[in-house]
Image (tube, rainbow, N blue to C red):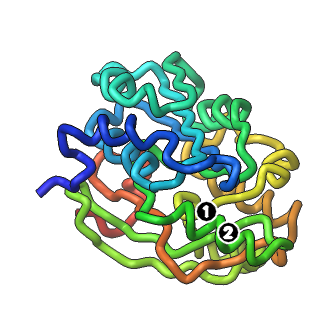
């Protein structure tokens, strides 16, 4: 059974409620979504942003000139997308750099076009930041899901520690991570020659620049990372359904 946000009248509801609350009362969240030939999943990714029920969201999609019909799906929702680009690029890192250059929000996030945000993630993280004004980076738990959106694993994030992260690898997921604009302004940018570990590069640099104390963990799952055969990082996982 498809989620309710796939109903035929969902777009009409979105248009009707586009300005249902005063945006000035909410910090703008800018989400960058890199994409390449993800027509199978990108609609679910887009809808996970639009379905947040958060009135001040900026969605920027950077597509690498997909040939599988991705553009048709993006055009379906273009009234709710702040900017989308479809052109040949030098890979995911290049797409991310392009996208973040256009962000105008106060809080940033990165969602791959085959992953999803979970309901109320945006309100959760803005509430955390409001209550903890000294913190600049919010991390949360995350789900692993398969092609059918079925849950494979529930993954717990740990309180951030740079040495732990550098030497014992991932204990958080970039799809369940949000950061203040000032953090990104001090980031050197994604290295173009990294094809699989640009998220590791980003998080290590955030840790070096901002320090462990700038991170805060919320004990809720914020996003879901999709595992499936054929994905770029499938060889990096031991269990794919």
Q: Secondary structure at mark 2?
A: strand
Which of the 4 quarters of the picture holds residue 98? top right
Quarter of the image for the C terminus: give it: bottom left
Q: Position of residue 222 (x, y in %)?
A: 49, 67
In this rendering, does residue 170 appear at all? no
Q: Position of residue 224 (x, y in %)?
A: 41, 63
Which of the 4 quarters of the picture holds residue 154? bottom left
Along the polypeptide, which appears first: circle 2 or circle 1?
2
Q: Exactly how many numbered labels are in the figure?
A: 2
In the displayed structure, would residue 79 be above or below residue 179?
A: above
Residue underneath mark 2: 138
Q: Position of residue 91 (x, y in %)?
A: 56, 31
Residue underneath mark 1: 177
Q: Is residue 13 left or right of residue 181?
A: left
In this rendering, does residue 152 appear at all? yes
Q: Position of residue 134 (x, y in %)?
A: 86, 73
Identified at 87% across, 65% down, the residue is: 210
Viewer-proximal residue among 199 and 136: 136
User: Alpha-carbon neighbours of circle 1 within 10 Å: few (<14), some, or many (≥20)?
Assistant: many
* C-alpha separation, residue under disc 2 versus residue under disc 1: 6 Å
Q: Is residue 195 left or right of residue 132?
A: left
Q: Is residue 110 left or right of residue 2?
A: right
Identified at 70% across, 48% down, the residue is: 24
Which of the 4 quarters of the picture holds residue 146? bottom left
Residues under numbered marks 2 and 1 in contact, where contact means CB atoms less than 8 Å apart? yes
Identified at 22% across, 55% down, the residue is: 3
Residue located farthest toward the left when viewing the structure as drawn: 1
């Amino acid at each position: 059974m498809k989620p309710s946000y796939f109903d035929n009248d969902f777009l009409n509801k979105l248009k009707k409620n586009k300005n249902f609350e005063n945006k000035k009362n909410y910090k703008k969240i800018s989400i960058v979504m890199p994409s390449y030939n993800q027509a199978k999943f990108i609609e679910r990714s887009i809808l996970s942003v639009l379905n947040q029920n958060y009135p001040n969201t900026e969605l920027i999609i950077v597509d690498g000139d997909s040939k599988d019909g991705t553009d048709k799906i993006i055009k379906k929702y273009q009234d709710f997308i702040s900017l989308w680009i479809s052109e040949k690029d030098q890979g995911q890192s290049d797409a991310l750099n392009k996208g973040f250059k256009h962000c105008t929000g106060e809080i940033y996030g990165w969602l791959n076009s085959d992953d999803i945000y979970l309901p109320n993630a945006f309100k959760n993280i803005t509430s955390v930041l409001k209550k903890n004004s000294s913190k600049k980076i919010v991390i949360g738990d995350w789900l692993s899901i398969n092609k059918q959106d079925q849950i494979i694993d529930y993954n717990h994030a740990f309180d951030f520690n740079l040495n732990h992260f550098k030497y014992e690898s991932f204990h958080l997921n970039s799809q369940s991570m949000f950061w203040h604009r000032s953090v990104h302004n001090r980031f050197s940018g994604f290295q173009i020659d990294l094809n699989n570990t640009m998220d590791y590069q980003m998080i290590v640099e955030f840790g070096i620049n901002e320090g462990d104390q700038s991170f805060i963990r919320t004990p809720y799952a914020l996003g879901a990372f999709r595992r499936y055969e054929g994905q770029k990082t499938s060889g990096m996982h031991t269990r794919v359904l």
